[in-house]
Image: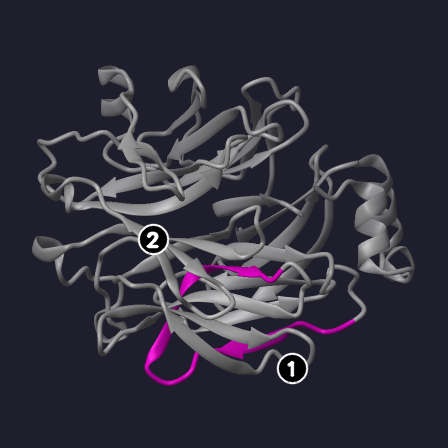
């Protein structure tokens, strides 16, 4: 994880010189740096680098609504992906030395809001949709130059959403949400009766399918969307249910590279309060705690990964973004609030912009 000194080193020697005086003060006051897409009070869209004390370090504008952000210290760049079915991604320089570059998805593809860099920062990978074939792909981009798209390989499912790189540096895990969309129909979900969500493990070197896991057939309308990795290397996931509102299946589980997939049993009242919707998943800095959010239920839940039980339940109106700090998590909301939970000492703060769905501790 980047702390302030490592952030400065990776961003380049000119970073501090590029900042305004108030931004320099903000950076000096904060050891940890977070990133999030935002919507401004005037209705525009952007992304923000934010210090742990709530200081705004820098911002960039976006052409439309952003979703998640990935940052590579090796590449010295960050990327904001459009909310699906968006067709842009914005590459930005955290040091502010270079103007942002907007990427456009190729014809027949749209972004799904998430992506990662290779460990050496030379390649960028993005979850995308081949929407005519209703199949997910991972787009591969050359991050050493102009971010030219140089290839793709399948996600082995429909509606890929978040992707992570496992600690081995070789294996991707992709949450195939199972939901078909098409830009001609906006965000309309076209195949709810035949959904087929899965967790796919894919070798990033050649696109080979290493393994694929599904929940039982009766849960085929449980869309697997967001993920985090715990201290044991298990991939925790959060789901969004697209079946009858009268049903309330479990929404949080984990999968492993050796073939295990299961849902954990959250208490009935907590499950009901999640409103069939998990918006973000994050692991604590030590990997011992998993946090999930529900902007639909205005709820944050921290789960002990070993005991597989909630240890903190916290209300936050329209709360969705989650990221680890030193001792717990920071959580952000679509109402512009930032709070600390599950051991974090951060006090509640209010901003004049609205946070989007995800927050990342810059790493």
Q: Which mark is residue 211?
A: 2
Q: Is 332 one of the magenta-colored residues?
A: no
Q: Which residue is pictured at 12% across the width and 36% down the height?
A: 245
Quadrant occupied by the N terminus = top right
Is 54 situated left or right of 282 in this image? right
Mark 1 closeness class: few <14, some 14–19, many ≥20 residues within 10 Å = few
Front-lying residue, 275 or 338: 275
Q: Which residue is mark 1?
A: 146
Q: Earlier along the polypeptide chain: callout 2 or callout 1?
A: 1
Q: Is residue 266 above or below residue 254?
A: above
Q: In the image, residue 317 lies at what x, y percent?
A: 41, 30
**Residue 242: which quarter of the image?**
top left
**Is residue 105 part of the magenta span, yes or no?**
yes
- Residue 318 percent coordinates (x, y): 40, 36
Q: Secondary structure at mark 1?
A: loop
Range shown magenta: 98-118
In the figure, residue 258 lies in which quadrant?
top left
The answer to whether mark 2 and mark 1 are in CB contact below 8 A is no
Q: Is residue 154 above or below residue 347?
A: below
User: Residue visible at 33% across and 33% down?
Assistant: 253
Mark seen at residue 232:
none
Determine the secondary structure under disc 2.
strand
**Which of the pair 120/283 is nearer the observer?**
120
Circle 2 Cα neighbour tier, 10 Å, few/some/many (<14 / 14–19 / ≥20) = some
Q: Is residue 178 visible?
A: yes
Taking the spot 54% from the left edge, 53% from the top edge, the residue there is: 37
Dominant SS of magenta comes to strand
Asked whether 143 or 95 is in front, the reply is: 143
């Amino acid at each position: 994880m980047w702390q302030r000194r490592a952030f400065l080193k990776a961003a380049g020697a000119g970073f501090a010189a590029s900042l305004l005086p108030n931004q320099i003060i903000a950076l000096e006051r904060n050891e940890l740096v977070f990133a999030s897409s935002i919507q401004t009070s005037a209705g525009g869209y952007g992304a923000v680098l934010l210090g742990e004390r709530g200081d705004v370090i820098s911002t960039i504008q976006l052409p439309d609504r952003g979703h998640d952000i990935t940052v590579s210290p090796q590449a010295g760049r960050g990327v904001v992906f459009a909310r699906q079915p968006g067709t842009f991604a914005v590459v930005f320089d955290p040091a502010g030395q270079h103007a942002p570059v907007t990427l456009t998805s190729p014809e027949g593809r749209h972004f799904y809001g998430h992506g990662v860099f290779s460990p050496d920062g030379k390649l960028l990978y993005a979850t995308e949709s081949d929407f005519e074939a209703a199949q997910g792909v991972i787009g591969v981009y050359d991050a050493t130059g102009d971010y030219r798209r140089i290839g793709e390989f399948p996600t082995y499912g429909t509606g890929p959403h978040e992707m992570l790189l496992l600690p081995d540096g070789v294996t991707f895990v992709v949450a195939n949400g199972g939901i078909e969309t098409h830009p001609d129909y906006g965000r309309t979900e076209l195949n709810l009766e035949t959904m087929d969500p899965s967790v796919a493990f894919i070798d990033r070197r050649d696109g080979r399918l290493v393994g694929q896991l599904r929940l039982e057939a009766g849960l085929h309308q449980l869309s697997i969307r967001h993920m985090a990795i715990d201290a044991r290397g298990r991939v925790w996931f959060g789901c969004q249910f697209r079946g009858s509102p009268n049903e309330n299946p479990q929404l949080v589980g984990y999968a492993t590279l050796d073939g295990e997939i299961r849902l954990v049993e959250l208490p009935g009242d907590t499950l009901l309060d999640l409103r069939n919707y998990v918006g973000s998943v994050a692991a604590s800095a030590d990997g011992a705690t998993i946090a999930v959010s529900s902007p639909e239920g205005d709820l944050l839940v921290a789960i002990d990964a070993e005991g597989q039980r909630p240890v903190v339940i916290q209300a936050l109106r329209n709360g969705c973004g989650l990221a680890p700090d030193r001792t717990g998590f920071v959580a952000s909301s679509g109402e512009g609030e930032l709070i600390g939970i599950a051991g974090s000492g951060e006090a509640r703060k209010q901003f004049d912009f609205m946070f989007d769905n995800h927050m990342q501790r810059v790493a």
